[in-house]
DNA sequence: CTGAAAGCGCTTACAG
DNA sequence: CTGAAAGCGCTTACAG
């Protein structure tokens, strides 16, 4: 069971350790026959370089830290939409993912980065005043984030343009003549902990609605069952509006069955539009027109930007803040 | 930005590197004042031991490899139910999680373990003839799995007792006088790639049903929308049965809205029972009686068993195969 | 084209 | 109670 080392390979091939190392990296030319002997030795011994030793020698771990927080007030299947593309993109770039889900985000970042376990990090669900950022600033590793913080300075930041998303959906309803609209937002707690996507969407939607003279009644949506259904029923009981904008994953996921159970047909009795990715929509069979949130794209962008900074010279290019333009997918649920 | 090393701490505290190391580990006694000087130096320099160097010296990475495959024929939110508890349990035991989602599982296991990036692994969605197991056997690190393979030999294996789960649900319906039952299973492809949970459940359910003289019509359920809804509608169109057993996450998640849309009331018009965790049920607002799948418990058991093997002497105790007894949660959806 | 040696930052017998 | 030194398994200038 003894794992073989580069020393074993060298001895077996009758060369020095450095030659084996160079054969592995291709950083200097090696005679044909020497290379063949080395390759044979590697194959016979089943040698793989030890990652820890390599990391120590090169100061590169080839690991990306992925910091996710599965908050109670967020909807876990939606978070997963970001995690998988990030994992895939990282692997394509030759990196592995250390996934950290600790509740104490700042502490976790501190722990992983100061011990040098990762070459860089991707931060998910970044809040406006995210406490992980001050910690990041004291670290030498670069970071990319999904979610817009107040002060992105050194970091590459990617997020959906939620303000534009709000306007697009209001436009969509305005064009169809709706004058009274229900807006269901993320939970109040999301605003309190600084989930900027929540107010960026809401503020823009309300302002756009005002410009049309549309009246909006706004509710903080729930995220846990059975509260979601109860609240939806209460809202629908009091409904005078002809349309509904849902910016809340848990609510939109529960909406079809609640509407069915009340005999409310979409779009005949009520127009519904939402904010969710195509995959999410499939997962929950959502037949609603929606702004595409592009978790796939955002996750990949974050990884690509991070990889650039990890390999390139520090501050090779200015950090970028990119708000991805939302597109609407018309599923005919508003009229 | 230069990260300080144990050498820096030693110099600052006026002691040797070994003394600092021992102060850190507590493996030998240190005089009060020496300790205080070291602690002060550590604090002033913001020193954290380098994980790679420590791993090289101790042959311990304090990392657990978590191998998940997000198959198209499985339902991702259900997989997440396993991942999070595993991450939590690992952290509680002092380990971090390297999450590997590569499609080529055997290759990924090979890569991570032979390079010594993890001290052990947890394998998720283990198949009957899982190709990752032969690779695991050539590695020195221990492994724990969730899902029952044909030959678990060296490994700790945890899974729900799906056969018992099938019997429990049939019993539940039999007691209520049902004679004709629909069974919706995982997709056919799950059987083909050796997802043992699928046939363990089905075989036991069919056998139990036979013992009662209950007639079962069995369907391979779909996992992708819009196929799920289409198929459900087809099945319900042809329905003669009074009850339905659903062992398919995607189908059960979509069921409420399909039933509502058809005006089928549960349990008045149709009795429905399923197989899903409490959290999953909440996520999708499922009002159905179900066998609890306990992903939380299974994930934690796997981590605990793995940790024991990683710290303790190799083969300290015999590998164990534990089939967790399912419990039924009666939500009144069958009568 | 190849080798000997230093160095990455720790831990841990060995000595005192 | 403490220190000097070897060693973990690599990479990479330096020399030839």
Image: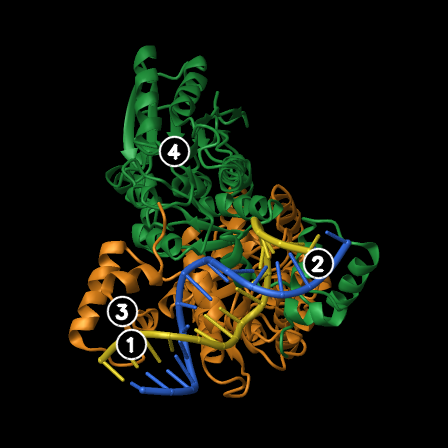
Chain colours: A orange, B green, C yellow, D blue
Q: Identify the subunit bearing mark 2.
A: A
Q: Identify the subunit bearing mark 4.
A: B
Q: Secondary structure at mark 1?
A: loop
Q: Is residue B150 left or right of residue B57?
A: left
Residue A7 percent location from the top left of the image: 34, 62
Q: Which residue is mark 4?
A: B247
Quarter of the image that includes the N terminus of chain A: top left
Q: Which residue is mark 1?
A: A26
Q: Secondary structure at mark 3?
A: loop
Please determine if labels 3 and 1 lie on a single subunit: yes
Mark 3 vs mark 1, foreground winner is 3
Answer whether residue A192 is visible to the viewer in this image. yes
Q: Identify the subunit bearing mark 1.
A: A
Please determine if labels 3 and 4 lie on a single subunit: no
Residue A186 percent location from the top left of the image: 63, 59
* Label 1: how many Cα within 10 Å (few below 14, some 14–19, many 20+): few
Residue B68 sits above or below residue A148 on the image = above
Residue at 76% x, 68% y: name it.
B13
Q: Secondary structure at mark 4?
A: loop
Q: Which residue is mark 2?
A: A188
Please determine if labels 2 and 3 lie on a single subunit: yes
CA separation in Å, label 2 and label 1: 56 Å
Residue at 49% x, 66% y: name it.
A64
């Amino acid at each position: 069971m003894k794992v073989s080392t580069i020393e074993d390979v060298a001895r077996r091939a009758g060369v020095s350790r450095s030659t084996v190392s160079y054969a592995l990296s291709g950083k200097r030319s090696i005679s044909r026959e020497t290379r063949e002997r080395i390759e044979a030795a590697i194959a016979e011994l089943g040698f793989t370089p030890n990652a820890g030793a390599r990391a120590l020698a090169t100061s590169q771990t080839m690991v990306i830290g992925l910091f996710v927080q599965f908050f109670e007030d967020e909807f876990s299947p939606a978070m997963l939409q970001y995690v998988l593309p990030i994992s895939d993109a990282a692997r394509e770039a030759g990196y592995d993912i250390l996934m950290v889900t600790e509740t104490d985000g700042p502490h976790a970042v501190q722990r992983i980065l100061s011990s040098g376990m990762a070459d860089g990090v991707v931060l998910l669900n970044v809040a406006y005043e995210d406490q992980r950022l001050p910690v990041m600033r004291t670290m030498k590793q670069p970071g990319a984030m999904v979610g817009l913080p107040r002060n992105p300075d050194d970091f590459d930041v990617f997020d959906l343009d939620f303000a534009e998303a709000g306007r697009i959906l209001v436009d969509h309803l305005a064009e169809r003549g709706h004058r009274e609209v229900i807006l269901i937002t993320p939970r109040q707690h999301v605003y309190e902990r600084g989930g900027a996507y929540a107010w960026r969407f809401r503020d823009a939607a309300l302002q756009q609605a005002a410009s049309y003279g549309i009246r909006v009644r706004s509710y903080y949506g729930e995220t846990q069952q059975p509260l979601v259904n109860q609240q939806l029923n209460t809202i629908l009981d009091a409904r005078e509006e002809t349309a509904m904008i849902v910016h809340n994953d848990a609510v939109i996921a529960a909406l079809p069955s609640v509407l069915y159970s009340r005999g409310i047909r979409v779009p005949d009795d009520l127009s519904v539009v939402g904010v969710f990715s195509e995959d999410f929509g499939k997962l929950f069979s959502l037949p609603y027109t929606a702004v595409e949130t592009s978790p796939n794209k955002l996750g990949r962008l974050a990884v690509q930007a991070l990889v650039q900074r990890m390999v390139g010279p520090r501050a090779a290019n200015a950090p970028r803040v990119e708000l991805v333009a939302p597109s609407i997918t018309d599923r005919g649920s508003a009229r």
